[in-house]
Image: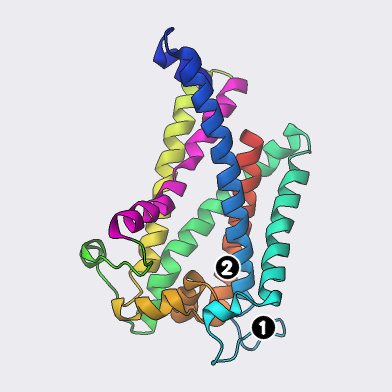
Amino acid sequence: LYYWSAQLAGPKHAALAGWTTGWFTWIGLLGVSAGSAFSFGQIFTALLYANPTSPLNLSRDASTSHAAEIETMRYKLICFAATAFVLFTVAILNSFSTKWLHKASQMWVPFNIAVMVVLSIACPIGASLKGMDMLSLGELYGLWNNSTGLPDSWAGAVGLLLPCFLYVGYDAPAHMSEESQHAMRSGPFAIITSILFGFLGWFTLWGALCTIPPSTYETLIKDPKTTSAGVDVWVNTVGPTGAVVMGVLLLVFQWTTMVSAVAAQ
């Protein structure tokens, strides 16, 4: 990407454009990797609170608030251990040969597409079977709710970060084009394809958000039963066992995409 930036900027600004792009790419990789790993740890820990019948269940007392629970040592240790685990295993797998990583990636791609489809349709189907009221896309886009305590402008900007994560995939083919055959054709094709597949993530977000009644926003955000608002949505729509299954699928999805993203860099 830094080479492309330098070429597009022209001789006068090539050095500055290449240097800036290179450093922002590196900082972005660190931020995305750290954020994805921490998200993995949070979801993994929340799943332990999801199923009351599980021997691994960590159900908190009704008198204990969400804010108090995530400050407990057991929550912090489990979340930290899961975060460290995914970072460590990603690093280990990326020390393997590129031949092995290539074969693994070929298996992960269809699996990850299937996971995205399952996550997109599970919540609406579960909500329909339970007779829950669902928001239309018009209502969803026409509704504004800010429970962050931040000004609306800041909350809106931060909220846009989640959809942006759906398009980080274009960066990987851009880097891999340096080592690809017929890069002038295969590079742009891979970039466009990754962006198109990113739209699957929009359907996943729509599928989850349309099942949340506006009257429950405040409780869901500030005091989720499982320590994660996202996992709570799954519990409400597909039940505790279904929530665990969806969570495990998402964790595997996160882990494989982190391995691929680091390998591409």
The residue range painted magenta reads 151-179
Residue found 62% across the figure and 34% down from its top: 264
Q: Name the residue under label 2.
A: 247
Residue 240 or residue 47, whichever sits in front: 47
Residue 99 or residue 264, whichever sits in front: 264
Give, as a three-letter code, the residue at label 2: Gly
Q: Residues within 10 Å of mark 2 (few under 14, many from 20)?
A: many
Q: Residues within 10 Å of mark 1 (few under 14, many from 20)?
A: some
13 shown above or below 144: above
Question: Element at badge 1?
Answer: loop
- Magenta stretch, main secondary structure, is helix
93 shown above or below 82: above
Residue 202 picture location, percent across and down: 38, 54
Q: Residue furthest top?
A: 11
Give, as a three-letter code, the residue at label 1: Asn
Residue 160 in magenta?
Answer: yes
Residue 103 picture location, percent across and down: 69, 39
Residue 57 is marked as: 1
Residue 95 or residue 65, whichever sits in front: 65
In the figure, residue 180 lies in which quadrant?
Answer: top right
Q: Are marks 1 and 2 in contact (CB under 8 Å)?
A: no
Residue 259 picture location, percent across and down: 66, 45
Task: Report whether 61 appears left or right of 191.
Answer: right
Question: Element at badge 2?
Answer: helix
Residue 136 picture location, percent across and down: 24, 68
Residue 148 in magenta?
Answer: no
Task: Report whether 1 appears left or right of 140.
Answer: right
Task: Report whether 131 appears left or right of 246.
Answer: left
How far apart in space, not on screen, are marks 1 and 2 (Cα)?
15 Å
Residue found 35% across the figure and 58% down from its top: 155
User: How many numbered markers are drawn?
Assistant: 2
Q: Residue 4, can we see it?
A: no
